Amino acid sequence: MFEQFSTGYYLGELYVQPRETDTAAIRRADHERVNEQLFGDESGLTRLDSPLVMKLGTQHFPVVGDDDLPSGTLTVPAETVPEDMKFEVPGRTEVFLADADRTGELLEYAGWQGGAPV
């Protein structure tokens, strides 16, 4: 789904759909698989519910899992679709996925603690 892009990000293509919600989300099975691949370690103690961080246009989004979404779809809060992306959404577009170190920094900066916003 994603391939290495830079030292801090992976690049992938997802169908991006705005929806009336407070959080960005992808299908839970996709979310867990990406969490295992990016954040897994030999101990097997990966938190599969930890948010991922994806960048769409100029905006970063903490992304959670949702069983009701089709695979390969990212939903974002409608009011937060970046201006530079409004002509592309809904539709397939490039999405950046922060690596483990960058995700930790971005979530901390955004006030996330233990998987919940502060």
Image (cartoon, rainbow, N blue to C red):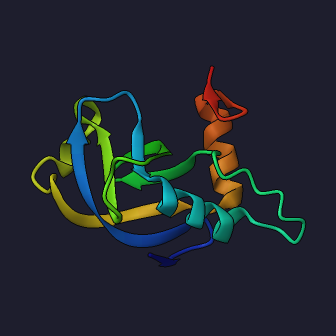
Q: Is residue 57 above or below residue 78?
A: below
Q: Is residue 69 left or right of residue 34?
A: left
Q: Is residue 82 above or below residue 54?
A: above
Q: Is residue 1 left or right of residue 57?
A: right
Seen at 45% across and 43% down, the residue is: 61
Q: Is residue 57 above or below residue 39?
A: above
Picture mark count: 0
Seen at 57% across and 65% down, the residue is: 34
The front one of 45 and 38 is 45
Seen at 32% across and 42% down, the residue is: 76
Give residue 65's position: percent from left, percent from top: 49, 47
Q: Is residue 50 left or right of residue 54?
A: right
Q: Residue furthest right?
A: 43
Quadrant of image for the N terminus: bottom left
Residue 42 location, quadrant: bottom right
Residue 51 location, quadrant: top right
Give residue 97's position: percent from left, percent from top: 50, 61
Seen at 15% across and 53% down, the residue is: 90
Q: Residue furthest bottom?
A: 3
Quadrant of image for the C terminus: top right
Q: Residue furthest front?
A: 67
Give residue 100's position: percent from left, percent from top: 68, 59
Q: Residue furthest top?
A: 118
Q: Is residue 21 left or right of residue 28?
A: left
Give residue 83's position: percent from left, percent from top: 19, 41
Q: Is residue 57 visible?
A: no
Q: Is residue 58 visible?
A: yes
